[in-house]
Amino acid sequence: MTSFRHLILLAVSIKAGAQKAEGNHGSRLYSTGSVRKLQQDPPLYGGEIPPIAGTPIKIDFGDSGSGDSSSANAAQGSDTSSQSNSGRTGNELDSEFVNLRFDGLSLREAWNIPPDPNGAAGTDSVVAVVNSQIEAHRKDGTFMYRTSLFDFFRSKSPTSSYIFDPKIVYDPHQDRFVVVALHTNSARTISFTFLAVSKNSDPLSPTTDDWYFSKINSRVEGSWADYPGLGVDEESIYVTANMFGGSRFRSLVWIVEKEGLYSGRAPQWGVYPSEGNFNNIYGTYQPAMVRDPNGVSDSSNDSSIGTYLVSYGYNNYLSVVRITNPNDNPSFARFYVFIGDVDNESLFDAPQLGNPCNIDTLGKGAMDASWHDGSLWVTFTLPFDGQATAYWVKVDTTNSNSLTVADQGKIEADDIAPRTHTFFPSIAVNMNGVVVMGFAASAETIYAGAYAVVRDDAIDPPGEVSATQVIRAGTSPYPYQWGSCSRNRWGDYTSVAVDPVDEDCFWVYNEYASENIWKTAWGRVCVDSDDKKSKSGKNSKSTKTGKSSKSIKSGKGTGKDSKSSKASKSGKDSNMGSQSGKDSKASKSGNDSNK
C-alpha cells in the first residue's frame, strides 16, 4: 500500500540553563546547555495508506506467488556462504559474525510496497511479518507456514483487507510472540489495532489453535492510527501510533496489560496521553524493548518505571518519555536530551546501481529502541556530507530524572562501497550489553541490500562499531517508484532480535533488491561476548584497518537465563472488568473477547 507524510513544523523553546521534564505529577528541572529554539523537521509519518483508487498496490505474478498458506512452499533452503554485492569491486565484505542465512517473504507472495519487514525469534522458530503476510520458519530455515494478515486476524472481523504496518516481538518474560497490525478503510472512518499473542513459545500454525487474538478501537477523537511502535517489558505491552485526522495531529500510546490477553480473555488497556499527562506529544515515538527479567530500574532502585518512549524530530534533541506505574494510574515525564550539533542538513534519498530513481529513506524519526541495565539505545537516520547515514545513540538512564548521552555514532558502511547510504536502522541489546544493529544500504555502485553491525561496550572504543556484516547483498536494481522517482518506497523499517535461548546470537530480518523486486532474508549474527580480544576495522570512520577479531558462535545455546518476575508494581487485583477513567487518567477497557 502507498503512504503519505504530513509536514508539521513544531517550534519548541527550551529555557536557558534548564530543561523541563513535563509530567502530570509536576515539573522537574535539570541542567542543560545554551539557549536553543528547536524546529521539527518534517517528521516521519510512514504507514501504508491505500491509494486514492481505494485498493492496495498489488503486482500480478500469475501462479508463482500466493498469500494463502495452502500454496506455500514446503521448505526454503538456508546457507552459510559469504555474500558479495555484484555491483561492488574489491575484497569480499566481512561476514565474520553471520553464520546462517535464509530467504523469507518477497513481493511475489506479499504484493505490497513497501513491505515493512519485521521479525522475532522464539525458542524454536522465527516469525516474520510484512505488509499483508505472516510467515514462520524453523531456525534452520525450514518453512513452517504462511498466511495473509487478513486471514490471520479473521476472527476479529476485519471489514476490509487494509491491514497494514505489522510488527512483531518476542516476549522473553512470558515466552510468547506478540504481533500488532493496524486496520482502517479507504474513508478512514474506522481505526482498529489488532493484537495477537502466541499461546506458547513455538506456535505451530497461524490459527486460533496457537494464538489468542484481540482488537482495540483506535479511533480517538475522529483520528486514525498509523505507523505503530511495539515494545514489551515484564508486565505490559506498549503500542504507539501517529494519529491523523480529527482536530489535531498527535502521538498516542496504548498500554495493554498482559494478564487478560495472555490467558485468552479481554485485555485491559489504557490510551494516553489524555489532557494533562504529557501534553499531547508530537513526533514518531518508539517504545523501548525491555528484556531484563526485573524490568527497568534506576540508581534509586525505583521499580515503578515501566519503559521509555523515544523520538527524534527536534533538531539535535531526543524527546524521551518515562512511563511510571504503567498498569496502575500511569504517570509520564518528558525529557529533551541534547545529542550535540550533529544534524544540520535535510535528509537525502539513497542512490542505487542500475536505476536513476533514488530509494526513499523516509525521514529522521526514531526507528527502534531498546533498554538494558541503565541504558536506552535508539536508532534513526541523519544526513552527513550529502549521505543518509544510520545513527545510534546510547542514553544513560541511571538517574531517571536527568538523562544524558553516554555514547553515539554513525553506521557509515564505507567498507561496502564509497559513499554508501545507510538507512532504516534497527537495534537489539542482549543481557551481556552487546548490541547488534540491522540496516539497509545502497550507493551508486551497489544494489540495495541488508546488512548489520555489532557493538560491544566492553571492547569497542566510543562511537565505533564492527565492520559491516552481510545479511543479503542486493543483486538487481529496485524500480518500484510510486508515481515519480521521489517515491521509490523502501522499508518502512527493519528488525533485529536477541535469540531467547542463546544471548550471544541475534536474528536480523531485512529486505534486499533481487530480480527487480524486494525480497527479505533472515541472518543469524553470533558473537562470543566472553572473547575480549581487541578489535580493529571499525565502521564509524571512513578509513578501515581490518576485520574485527571477535570469535563466532555457531552452536546453539544450552538454555535460557533464569527469569525472576518483578514484584507487583501496582498491587492491582485480577478483575478484568472495565474501569472508568478519572482526572487525567485514560479509561481502561476490556470490551473485546478473545477467540
Image (cartoon, rainbow, N blue to C red):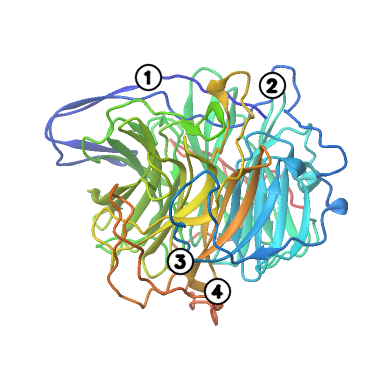
Of 287 and 50, nearer the camera is 50
**Residue drawn at (72%, 28%) of the image:** 57
Dot 4 amino acid type: Val
Mark 2 and mark 4: Cα distance apart in space? 42 Å
Of 356 and 31, nearer the camera is 356
Looking at the rendered structure, which numbered label has been put on residue 501? 4
Choose mark 2 or mark 3, whichever is in front: 3
Quick one: SS at disc 3? loop
First along the sequence among labels 2 and 1: 1
Dot 3 amino acid type: Glu
Looking at the rendered structure, which numbered label has been put on residue 479? none
First along the sequence among labels 2 and 3: 2
Q: Which residue is mark 3?
A: 96
Choose mark 3 or mark 4, whichever is in front: 3
Of 92 and 384, nearer the camera is 92
Q: Position of residue 260 (x, y in %)?
A: 64, 57
Looking at the rendered structure, which numbered label has been put on residue 9? 1
Q: Which residue is mark 2?
A: 51
Quick one: SS at disc 4? loop
First along the sequence among labels 2 and 4: 2
Cβ atoms at labels 4 and 1 below 8 Å apart: no
Q: Is residue 523 left or right of residue 285?
A: right
Dot 1 amino acid type: Leu
Mark 3 and mark 1: Cα distance apart in space? 44 Å
